[in-house]
Image: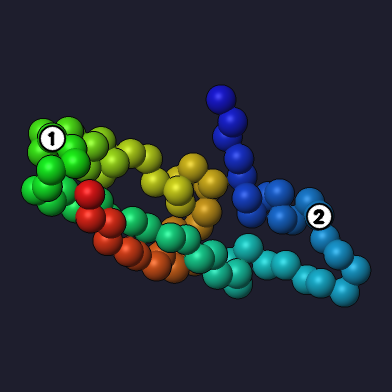
Amino acid sequence: MDKPDLPMALALCPKPGLSFETMETSYFLGRETVIPQAGLDMASWRKKLFAAMFRNSGSAVSYFRLPPNRVVELGAQVVL
């Protein structure tokens, strides 16, 4: 299982003339919210189950080991 550390990976690949400070860098992430909606294409219990599993999935902030106070999350709602 991979355990990526994005700030450390960025620190290991500096370019000449480019300075990188972990606590001065902003990280932008996308966050989706799944909303089950009644319809004919899929059973409603499957939509609710998928939405619950999606909601309980792990955070990208902790997966990539990003400093939580340096993360900006942009959200969208996805209707099933």
Say which of 39 and 49 sits in front.
39
| CB contact under 8 Å: marks 1 and 2 | no
| Residue pictured at 9% horizontal, 48% vertical | 38
Pinpoint residue 53: horizontal percent, then vertical percent: 25, 36
Label 2 element class? loop
User: Which one is earlier in the sequence, the residue at label 1 or at label 2?
Assistant: 2
Q: Which residue is mark 2?
A: 13
Residue drawn at point x = 23 percent, y = 37 percent: 50
Q: Nearer the viewer, residue 26 or 49?
A: 49
One can see residue 13 in this view? yes
Residue 62's label in the rendered image is: none
Would you say 20 lies left or right of 30 here? right
Q: Is residue 75 left or right of 9 when viewed as pictured?
A: left
Pinpoint residue 22: horizontal percent, then vertical percent.
63, 63
Residue 31: image quadrant is bottom left
- Front-most of residues 51 and 68: 51
> Of tags 1 and 2, which is closer to the observer?
1
Label 1 and label 2: CA atoms lie apart by: 48 Å
Q: Position of residue 58 (x, y in %)?
A: 37, 40
- Residue holding disc 1: 43
Secondary structure under badge 1?
loop
Q: Residues within 10 Å of mark 1 (few under 14, many from 20)?
A: few
Q: Residue at x 18, y 38 (%)?
A: 42
Instruction: Look at the picture and state if 41 lies above or below 61.
Output: above
Residue 16 vs residue 31, the one in the foreground: 31
